[in-house]
Image (cartoon, rainbow, N blue to C red):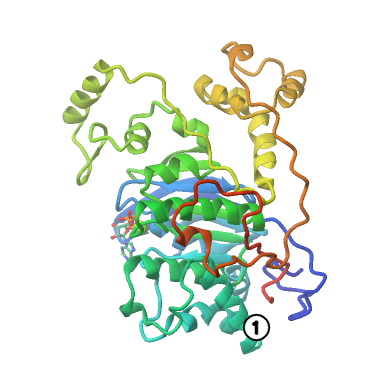
């Protein structure tokens, strides 16, 4: 099957009527990784739901980059499985791994550009390696992605001749050229100024709406963690301490999660990663003395006007509502604020009252204005008038519905 690890039935180049799919689910089961006697993390179990955006947090050195590399099969964990389309990435043949890797778009932490190749050739590399596109088709895709990340005009530059932020964006463009179904970004926002980070966050949400790929983003940016993902996970002390819907982590009173998401000095995380128990207890007592108030959740970023809704939102809603009764009351309340009353009534009629708290008192979201269900975008529809993408421009006061946007198509199979 095209898009499957076997690649069976793929017809390179023949994609006119290709069906566009949502991203694939990634199931991580009991994964453990060591380097010699150093355990990086053990028994990590989580599922990246198809088409949703997840963020992985954790202090420096907790193994986030090692985790991403394990998902693509670049590092081999000693125990556990990573299941993608039924194939265990940790235990499959080289040819299966080759096919699986075509599903991924990866932005490594250091950008991983070839120093001797100009930006155009760097970004074109996966297309030349994995597809049979002609040079003119390669050029079209490369320039489209370079325009999207604001690098048009820098095609001839070598990585050593541009700023760190530009290198990051070149890596981003390269990660997107194969229209991946699973996107892994390792700190896409490091080295970017705050305005570009805001544009990047919007770009991620918009991309997700357009291609419905499964995203996993490693970030240290609290703003990104609070506003972009559907799900958040956190690595600490060799364990995945928590993973779940954003509302669960954002309302969590787990000290390490709270400390990280609020960027506090007080808590279990110290400068050299871990603190001694006495100091931590004193700091937590200090915090408990202060009135911290109710945790405040910033709403999740919405898709830009003129783009289709994120399909993942409704899928996630259905998924989260199935198990909402098992979540902490604060998380339940936050989830219900985002849900249409009719959906809550329907769930309650199936499962009984949803929370221990009085659900009726929770302010709920007004019904979503129903956008027209848009056909899956398959080709770019709009080209920015000035040839410059929105996220490289100065912020506009109001992004109008007519704002020009670029849409992306994603089709079955690695061949484009
Ligand atoms: N190839 C390798 N061989 C040996 N040790 C490694 C290798 N790759 C990573 N490590 C070690 O694994 C640990 C986790 O590294 P990793 O780069 O995943 O951390 P991280 O959470 O991504 O940190 P940061 O936030 O600083 O990027 C570190 O102690 C690192 O030295
Ligand atoms: Mg890292």
| Residue 23 in view of the camera | no
Residue 407 percent across, percent down from the top left: 66, 62
Residue under the point 61% across and 49% down: 400
Answer above or below: position of 62 versus 258: below
Q: Residue at x 53, y 55 (%)?
A: 203
**Residue 337 at least partly seen:** yes
Which residue: 73% across, 27% down? 343
Foreground pick, 301 / 175:
301
Label 1 neighbour load within 10 Å: few <14, some 14-19, many 20+: few
Q: Is 96 in front, or is 25?
A: 25
Classify 116 as above or below 148: below
Q: Secondary structure at mark 1?
A: helix
Q: Quadrant of residue 354?
A: top right
Position of the N terminus by quadrant: bottom right
Q: How many marks?
A: 1
Question: Most extreme residue toward the right, as rendered?
Answer: 17
Where ligand 2 lies, by quadrant?
bottom left
Residue assigned mark 1: 137
Q: Is mark 1 within 8 Å of ligand 2?
A: no
- Give the percent coordinates (x, y) of residue 298: 47, 33
Q: Position of residue 402 (x, y in %)?
A: 66, 53
Q: The C terminus lies in which quarter of the figure?
A: bottom right
The image position of residue 26, as x and y in percent, is 59, 53
Q: Give the residue drawn at x 56%, y 77%.
A: 142
Does residue 278 appear to the left or right of 233 in the view shown? Answer: left
């Amino acid at each position: 099957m095209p898009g499957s690890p076997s690649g069976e039935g793929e017809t390179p180049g023949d994609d006119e009527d290709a069906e566009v799919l949502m991203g694939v689910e990634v199931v991580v089961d009991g994964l453990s990784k060591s380097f010699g006697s150093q355990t990086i993390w053990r028994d990590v179990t989580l599922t990246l739901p198809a088409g949703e955006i997840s963020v992985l947090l954790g202090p420096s050195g907790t193994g986030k980059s090692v985790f991403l590399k394990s998902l693509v099969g670049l590092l081999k964990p000693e125990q556990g499985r990573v299941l993608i389309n039924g194939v265990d990435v940790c235990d499959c043949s080289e040819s299966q791994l080759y096919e699986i890797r075509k599903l991924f778009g990866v932005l490594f932490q250091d950008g991983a550009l070839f120093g001797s190749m100009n930006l155009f050739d760097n970004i074109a590399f996966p297309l030349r390696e994995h597809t049979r596109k002609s040079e003119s088709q390669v050029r079209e895709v490369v320039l489209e992605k370079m325009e999207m990340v604001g690098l048009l005009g820098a095609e001839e530059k070598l990585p050593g001749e541009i700023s760190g932020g530009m290198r990051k964006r070149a890596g981003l463009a390269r990660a997107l050229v194969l229209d991946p179904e699973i996107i892994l970004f390792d700190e896409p926002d490091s080295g970017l100024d705050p305005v570009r980070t805001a544009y990047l966050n919007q770009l991620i949400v918009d991309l997700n709406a357009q291609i419905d790929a499964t995203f996993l983003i490693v970030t240290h940016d609290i703003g990104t963690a609070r506003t972009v993902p559907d799900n958040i996970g956190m690595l600490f002390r060799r364990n995945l301490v928590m993973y779940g819907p954003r509302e669960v982590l954002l309302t969590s009173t787990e000290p390490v999660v709270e400390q990280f998401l609020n960027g506090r000095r007080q808590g279990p995380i110290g400068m050299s990663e871990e603190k001694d128990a006495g100091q931590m207890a004193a700091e937590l007592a200090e915090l408990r003395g202060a009135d911290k108030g109710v945790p405040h959740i910033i709403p999740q970023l919405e898709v830009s006007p003129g783009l289709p809704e994120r399909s993942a939102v409704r899928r996630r809603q259905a998924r989260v509502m199935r198990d909402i009764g098992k979540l902490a009351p604060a998380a339940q309340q936050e989830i219900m604020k985002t849900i249409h009353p009719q959906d809550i009534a329907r769930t309650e009629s199936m499962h009984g009252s949803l929370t221990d708290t009085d659900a009726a008192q929770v302010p709920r979201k007004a019904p979503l204005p129903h956008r027209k269900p848009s056909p899956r975008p398959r080709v770019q529809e709009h080209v920015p008038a000035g040839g410059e993408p929105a996220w490289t421009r100065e912020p506009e006061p109001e992004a109008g519905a007519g704002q020009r946007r670029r849409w992306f198509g994603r089709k079955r199979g690695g061949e484009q």
